[in-house]
Image (cartoon, rainbow, N blue to C red):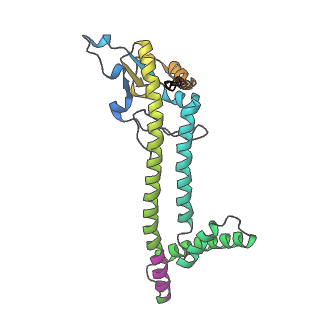
Amino acid sequence: MGHHPSAWGWQEKAGEDSVMKRTISALVGGLLLLAAGAVPAVAAEAQLAYGVVDMVRVGKECPGIGAMQEESAQFAQEQQVKLYDRERVMMLADADYTRYFDLRLLAAPTEANTKQLADLERLAVDRMGRFRELTAIKDRTADQQKEYDELNKVYATRMGELSRFRAELQRAVDEQQAKLAKQTDAKVEAAAKAVAAEKKLSLVFVRAALIFGGTDVTDEMIAKLNAPAPAPAAPKATPAPTATAAPAATSAPATPGK
């Protein structure tokens, strides 16, 4: 499964530290932000102050960022498992193929259901092995050719289905990673802008984009990203309506005496 590109230079790392990172994309990938939105005009390059950030450390030491990366990696892994499940039984005939996935959907499979699943998986492996044997035979007998044609038809059908299914899963992964990348990048960019303003930096780059130079602001970035979000401002109290005095009672006009 591919990974959604992002301007922050995430990289994918295997092993226990395997978290979803994004690919550095040349110069634009290295450039995190421009302080105050643009590079100020300077007379000499030496006047341009810039910072650098180790995004691998940020991913490891910022729970919020790391959680998004792990969520992205977990989702991609789940889609890969779905694809593998179909690939390993692809040589089953149509009825058995449908039956297999019907059994997989059972919320509480019985012991007999579990045995059926295992039998179908073994059958799929056997049929794939037989298909490979027949493919390697140059001069097949009539019976072998008939068997080969039947297996080859199943193989061709499943390959087409798998291709479409793989594309669907890839789209799902791309969409999910794009969503998380947007959330992650927004948080990182906000923190970088705040650090750049405090340090009076014009630019902030990811460490991997530079060979040398720059002020390391990784600790400051981590502190910003781990800082608790400010509490929302309490809504202003609505003043109580002013009571309106009731109008004075009007006396009835006196009746003149007779």
- Residue 173 visible in this rendered orientation of the protein: yes
Q: Where in the figure is residue 201, as x and y percent of width and height?
A: 39, 15
Is 149 drawn above or below residue 231 in the view shown? below
Residue at the farthest bottom position: 142
Is 84 drawn above or below residue 214 in the view shown? below
Please say whether residue 239 is one of the residues in the magenta stretch.
Answer: no
The foreground one among 136 and 27 is: 27
Q: Where in the figure is residue 38, as x and y percent of width and height?
A: 30, 21
The foreground one among 86 and 32 is: 32
Is 19 drawn above or below residue 165 in the view shown? above
Left or right of residue 213, residue 15 in this image: right
Quadrant in the rendering for residue 213: top left
Who's the residue at 71% across and 65% down the image? 108
Residue at the farthest front position: 258
Please say whether residue 152 is one of the residues in the magenta stretch.
Answer: yes
Who's the residue at 38% across and 29% down the image? 30
Q: Where in the figure is residue 80, as x and y percent of width and height?
A: 53, 55
Left or right of residue 140, residue 99 in this image: right
Is 128 drawn above or below residue 226 in the view shown? below
Q: Where in the figure is residue 173, as x and y percent of width and height?
A: 47, 50
Who's the residue at 43% across and 79% down the image? 138
Q: Which residues are magenta?
A: 143-154
- Residue 126 visible in this rendered orientation of the protein: no
Quadrant in the rendering for residue 96: bottom right
